[in-house]
Image (cartoon, coloured by chain):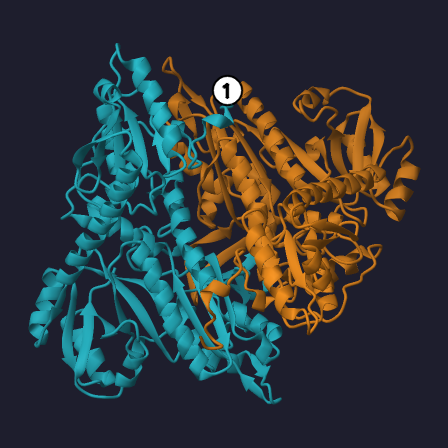
Chain colours: A orange, B cyan
Amino acid sequence: MSEGLEDPASVSRAGRRPEAVPDTAEQFVSDRKDFTNWYKSVLEYTQFLDDRYPLKGCYVWRPFGHQALRRFLDIVDGELRASGHEEVCFPLLSPESLFSRESDFLHGVQSESLRVTHYGAEPLGEDLIVRPTSETIMYPMFALWIRSHADLPLRVYQTVPVFRWETKMTVPMLRNREVNKFNEAHTAHSSRGDMERQITEAVRTYRRIFDRLLLPYRIFLTPPWDTFPGAEYNFDFIGVLPNGKAVELGSVIALGTKFSGVYDIGFTTPDGRRELVWQTCYGLSERALGTAVAVHGDEAGLRLPAELAPWQVVIVPIPTRATAERVHAYAEGLARDLAAEVRVHLDGRDLAPGRKFYHWEAHGVPLRLEIGGREVNADGVTIAVRYNRRRVEVSRAELPATIRRLLAESDAALREGAKEEFQRWFVDLEDEETARSRLADQGGIVLLPWDGTVASGREMAERVGGTALGVPVADPERPLETRDLLGKTSRRLAFARTV
Amino acid sequence: MSEGLEDPASVSRAGRRPEAVPDTAEQFVSDRKDFTNWYKSVLEYTQFLDDRYPLKGCYVWRPFGHQALRRFLDIVDGELRASGHEEVCFPLLSPESLFSRESDFLHGVQSESLRVTHYGAEPLGEDLIVRPTSETIMYPMFALWIRSHADLPLRVYQTVPVFRWETKMTVPMLRNREVNKFNEAHTAHSSRGDMERQITEAVRTYRRIFDRLLLPYRIFLTPPWDTFPGAEYNFDFIGVLPNGKAVELGSVIALGTKFSGVYDIGFTTPDGRRELVWQTCYGLSERALGTAVAVHGDEAGLRLPAELAPWQVVIVPIPTRATAERVHAYAEGLARDLAAEVRVHLDGRDLAPGRKFYHWEAHGVPLRLEIGGREVNADGVTIAVRYNRRRVEVSRAELPATIRRLLAESDAALREGAKEEFQRWFVDLEDEETARSRLADQGGIVLLPWDGTVASGREMAERVGGTALGVPVADPERPLETRDLLGKTSRRLAFARTV
């Protein structure tokens, strides 16, 4: 085979060619305290994505990052399908007349939406809106699809690019103008009760997704002045970045019958009446992946949850001239044996082992197997564990069980570490001045007493210099109860600076 | 569990809820001779995709169609990865200044490209072009990624929506204005030789993809006046629809160094010189899936290749009051046993078996297992084979092997049937008048003698009333040889009416 045409058999199981791994000579070291720089550097060093595309807030997924993205989307797909959702795909563009039918929605998103006005030099007859979210695109079709109660519930989802041309600062994955992978689910039901049960179920689904990313979060009932345009109420899953900024991981929205009224989505009941459907929608995006990158990393680079890692195990041979043949044969045997169990990659490049160590540590591979003459002679393996950077020696016989145990241990440690940090960001305060200075100095999330009125909530946000996240949900297993809290006095409202 | 929250365990293995299957009471029957109507009807009946979205040439993938689409994309992904390509994802929008740098390309695609000029009511500083294809989006980044010969070859691909706002007639999947799933691969190499080897390899990869769709095609070297803007030459894979119209299934393009010159994509050679990279790109889309739908169907609906079919086997119980319990238990046991082997679905809906038969025949499921009291008593199964609509009785012991054999037989029959039809569309003619009337009356592809000059080729296309597809590649395993034919006289040029 020529240089230009590699043998397909050399392609690794994970689908990524070893040859495409960049030769990174330098160790990645970046102070986590300067989060902005750490995040930018680690994405660049690992070639996760490229922030140099000449359009602000639009990024390029490179092969390594795209593999992690695929694993993230597999988790999302799997959880949505397991809870009864079917995948669909709707168009990107919406005629303005369709887009503007629901007026709250229109006012909420129009000012940040991109407009297509021409093809070539010709003006279009009607402007087209580039999808900021898909309510106005999907719901006219739902009106055609849903006829009777037998067509309900309807539960569909899609993963598509959406656009919000914000003028604020942009950060790869965390605040994009092109959200490259927006996953939005939309459901329709025959009663308010069914809608609310779906909200509860959607919250559970999202909990499972973020749990699999080992991400800590809290759920808030969004304050009424910040509720999704056209919705009755919504819940936001909020995480915190290492710089103390709050990040919205996902949103679960009870739409009620407002959109179904506007788009005339009705159904015939078993006794022949016609009623409007009750709708929900919920969305998340690569922002959750970016948050996982941000919170799990350390000064040596990424630390990936085992489910997200393109490779869970790398094997690095450490040959000498005398042992080379045996070391490589042993390493190849190991790679073959482990392939059925884990995503394993044998790094056979002609580079110093130390450089490979740096490389894979920065890429966050949970476990590295080091194979030298000593390991071959002892029929064993030295395992370097990424999360705590310790080394363990095991016999080959123990290896599969040890790998399983260490991957689970690594995930548990990342989850616990992130959770502890997350809890430190939370403070319950009594006075606004303390809250204001804490948000300004450290960030995090502050809870303050609130009389429950819109006016005072908005004024408090002004005074503390943050965004009102909403009312924390006490028992996240039963989020709907919190809805009843609204309208009562004396409870707590959360504030934060957001990404 | 309430009506609104199904038990996730009831979700079928293929990820599609049985409950979402529409209750189609009527048998699908549509004359294949009226292809336009057949195609429209079958997409509607099977809820494959929806052509009622209020924007011409933009379609909605419904759950059933999206499952077939996923399987199609899995085939494409798998073949591209196996031949050394890595997945990436680039932005949708391109600043006009970037877009217009390569002038041939610009003139070729600008007039059909959509332009974003505003966000909200505000004009943008610079117009943004909505991706018609990604050369101008990717190549400025390639210039940053490629430094030395060690970075070559570069082989990446992405699957993204692209837009060509053509004014011509649109047909779902076959001629869209929003091509929802455009799969485009882009490669860079250190020499012309490597580029040409990549072209050969790409042709092989595309052959494997279309072969797995059981699609017949021929490969043409595109005539120079129709070559991709900015390219040296390109090959098109051409199929024929049941209405005699030619359809381009995919295109493999040798770009040479024109784009790398414009975007300054250079590399350092081992001896320290700086040279431009040699590039290729190749693309295909859901059009190939649409063609598979079109050519394999019959008057009773879809006939899906086993790889594309969301379900390969459906089980339909035929209970009587006396046998119901045993029949259902037997059917459930079968579904469990077969799940490890094939994508199987047990249709347990409370509907007359005949209606289920119609339903699954129209959906193109290759095999239907009918289970009544007789089958239970005999410990056997009646298999209804979709492609030839025959029935076979087998014992349960023989079932797994029989299913494998029948799926292979079904695929072979679809492939052969499509190939025979395809060959009938081809005629080698001597005079243009016969060609003209054949294209007008029947369509298909006509080959005519050609003196090899651009002027005469274009005039011939005018006179025969078709599009010049190019010079047929005699030995598709070695397509590059045909390039040498250009410039010589006396050879054949192919014409067709296109979709």
Q: In which quadrant of the rendered view does residue A149 lie?
A: top left
Q: Which subunit holds the residue at mark 1?
A: A
Identify the residue shown where x is 26% and y is 43%: B405
Q: What is the x, y in percent for residue A336?
A: 55, 55
Name the quadrant of the N terminus of chain A: bottom left
Q: Is B310 positioned to the left or the right of B468 in the image? A: right
Q: A123 or B486: which is nearer to us?
A: B486
Q: B131 or A407: which is nearer to us?
A: A407
On the question of residue A477 being in view, the answer is yes
Can you say whether B311 is above or below B34 in the image? above
Q: Is B482 positioned to the left or the right of A46 in the image? A: left
Can you say whether B274 is above or below A272 in the image? below
Residue picked out by circle 1: A191
Identify the residue shown where x is 92% and y is 38%: A433
Give the structural element (helix, strand or loop) at label 1: loop
Identify the residue shown where x is 69% and y is 53%: A380
Q: What is the x, y in percent for residue A482?
A: 70, 23
Q: What is the x, y in percent for residue B56?
A: 35, 51
